[in-house]
Amino acid sequence: MTTTGLDDAATRPPVAERRLHPVTPFRRAWAPVTVLAGWAVHDPNGAQEQVQRLTSAMLLTGLAVLVPAAGLYGFLSWWFTHYAVTDNELRIRTGLLFRRTAHIRLERIQAVDVTRPLLARVAGVAKLRMDVVGADKKDELAFLGEREARALRAELLARAAGFAPEAAIEVGEAPARELLRVPPRGLALSLLLTGATWGSLIAALVVPPLLWLATHSLWTVLAVALPLLGAAGTRSAGRFVAEYDWTVAESPDGLRIDHGLLDRAHETVPPGRVQTVRIVEPLLWRRLGWVRVELDVAGSDNSVLVPVAPRAVAESVIAHVLPGVTVPAAPSRPPRRAGRCAPVRWRGYGLAVTESVFAARHGLLRRHLSLVPHAKVQSVRLTQGPWKRLWRLADVHVDTGADKTVTARLRSAEEAARLLSEQAERSRTGRRDARPDRWMA
């Protein structure tokens, strides 16, 4: 009787479990303090009454107990957290009182991102976040040393690509070639030319004088003007900080995206998992020829590919996400009778179907052109309400694997019926000829 499999399992060395970086207890020690802060915010009056009843000695005694208890909690939670990479999974064991073990199958990993918040950068540590098929939220390891995080990321991607355990460690991080870098000046100018920024500024300048004329109350004006000004500045400043030094690079494991002024993020666009690419053209960007590129990725939260770039440069980056795809130049508008259903908006709708993609456009002031590869189409639907049926119009909906829908609106009924049958056949052919969704393929 042959017992090779049992003998291999018996002689195989045990998997070595590793702990997180020693700085992690300081992060987790804030959990008890956060609970108290949440209670105080939830019931501020009750918290104030409780604090007033306490004497100085009682407060000092409470702090003397709380600080060591928080430190002990952080240390124990770190001590009981382990992770290990086995032959076919990443195993994470956590929990101080209630134990939890996560088994992440390596072949189901879609993306592995390395993020470094500001304080983590100072401490020389990083957070590893993983997109897994079928998981509602990302699993993470926080925190690891920067070198350890990058090495573990490279190992996980290599193992997900099918490399043997020993070879995966030797492969290391795949080389990358830079495709795009957004200069800070261009990013700042693009934010100034965004309609949302101007809308917030106009509201901050127009609403306060009207309130003053109506109420003659300085406090009312300040209570409204300050939040409006803050919203106008915070929205633009927040995007500038998040998208600062945006870099897109090509590597065998996908497109790598690095960005962030304070918190640095190192993300990966999983190959073969992009379901939809959107080209966004705000009104004030068109004269400069700038666009923004967004993504719908199955099993991933990554949604921005290019924050701002000339259209030709953006299309060259899209060609690396969707190989062989050419962005349609001029989608066709619906028939003029569509104005009966949407008197103004119908001019912003458009449709183009090429050999590789289904492309639908909508929007007048802020145009959106959505590109769906035929291989990523999960289902096709035709809808037609009574009013559209009267004017022989219909909408064609294309559903993707990212639980998103792209719609070609107000097409003629004959075109919509033909598109429905033809798109179903193109989708079947596209899935048959599509490349496998594998890392480093």
Image (tube, rainbow, N blue to C red):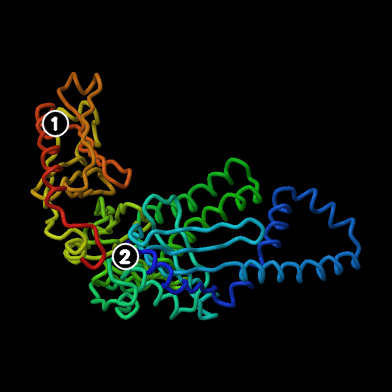
How many C-alpha atoms fall within 10 Å of the one at disc 2: few (<14), some, or many (≥20)?
A: many
- Asked whether, in this view, residue 286 is left or right of residue 123, the answer is left
How many C-alpha atoms fall within 10 Å of the one at disc 1: few (<14), some, or many (≥20)?
A: many
Examine the rendering and report whether any part of residue 260 can be seen.
yes
Which quadrant of the view contains residue 339? top left
Which quadrant of the view contains residue 352? top left
**123 vs 396, nearest the viewer:** 123
**Where does label 2 land, which residue?**
160
Of callouts 1 and 2, the N-terminal one:
2
As measured in the structure, the alpha-carbon distance from the residue carrying label 1 to the one carrying label 2 is: 41 Å
**20 vs 377, nearest the viewer:** 20
Residue 429's x, y, as percent?
11, 45
Residue 317's x, y, as percent?
21, 65
Residue type at tag 1: Ala
Residue at (56%, 54%) from the top-left corner?
227
Residue type at tag 2: Ala
Q: Which mark is residue 416?
A: 1
Q: Nearer the viewer, mark 1 or mark 2?
A: 2
Q: What element carries label 1?
A: helix
Which quadrant of the view contains residue 69? bottom right
Residue 291's x, y, as percent?
25, 59
Tell me the quarter of the image containing the C terminus: bottom left
Where 265 falls versus 42 (above or below)? below
Tell me the quarter of the image containing the N terminus: bottom left
Query: Could you tell me how many numbered marks the image carries?
Result: 2
Residue at (59%, 40%) from the top-left corner?
214
Q: Residue 314 carries which label?
A: none
Where 202 falls versus 426 (above or below)? below
Q: Is mark 2 on a helix, strand or loop?
A: helix
Residue 336's x, y, as percent?
13, 31
Residue at (68%, 54%) from the top-left corner?
38
